[in-house]
Image (cartoon, helix red, strand yellow):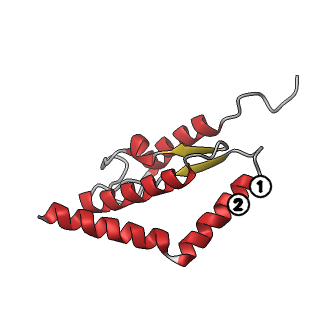
Amino acid sequence: MDLIKVLVGSTLYVLTWVVLRKYRQQFNLINQLIQENPQTTFVCISPFPAVASTHNLLRRLGGLILKHRFDATPNLRWVDSHDILRRDYAFLPDGIHLNKEGHKALADDLYAVCRPTQSLIPG
């Protein structure tokens, strides 16, 4: 029964967050920026994982909604922070915030996603 409460509560929380006018406007502005700059590659990172199951579920749902909103955008790369950081106390010593090792793991993965495919320096 507790799992059902968490799922229903999490779903309502995320849906409320998505449908609020303020957030719709932000999504629209981000989408407009991406559409107006097709030569620019944008990177979107999912909300970071948390060790606590309830927090992690909320963050995972929020990330799935973000991914779904931008899924068909060719100049946007999606980075799932859950794949990089896991729910690991080695990266999240207080269960929520990244430590130095967590920031390094994230930076290494972002570098791999963002690194240019060709040299920017001629010759």
Give me the disc on residue 36: 1
- In the orientation shown, which residue stands out farthest toward the top? 123
> From the viewer's perspective, is residue 1 above or below residue 115?
below
- Horizontal and vertical percent position of residue 55: 31, 62
Q: Is residue 115 left or right of residue 21?
A: right
Dot 1 and dot 2 residues touching (CB under 8 Å): yes
Q: Please state, as top left, top right, bottom left or bottom right, where the C terminus lies in the image.
A: top right
Q: Residues within 10 Å of mark 1 (few under 14, many from 20)?
A: few
- Horizontal and vertical percent position of residue 122: 87, 27
Residue, disc 2:
32
Q: Amino acid at mark 2?
A: Gln
Q: Residues within 10 Å of mark 2 (few under 14, many from 20)?
A: few
| Quarter holding residue 62 | bottom left
Give me the disc on residue 117: none
| Quarter holding residue 97 | bottom left
- Horizontal and vertical percent position of residue 59: 38, 59
Q: Amino acid at mark 1?
A: Glu
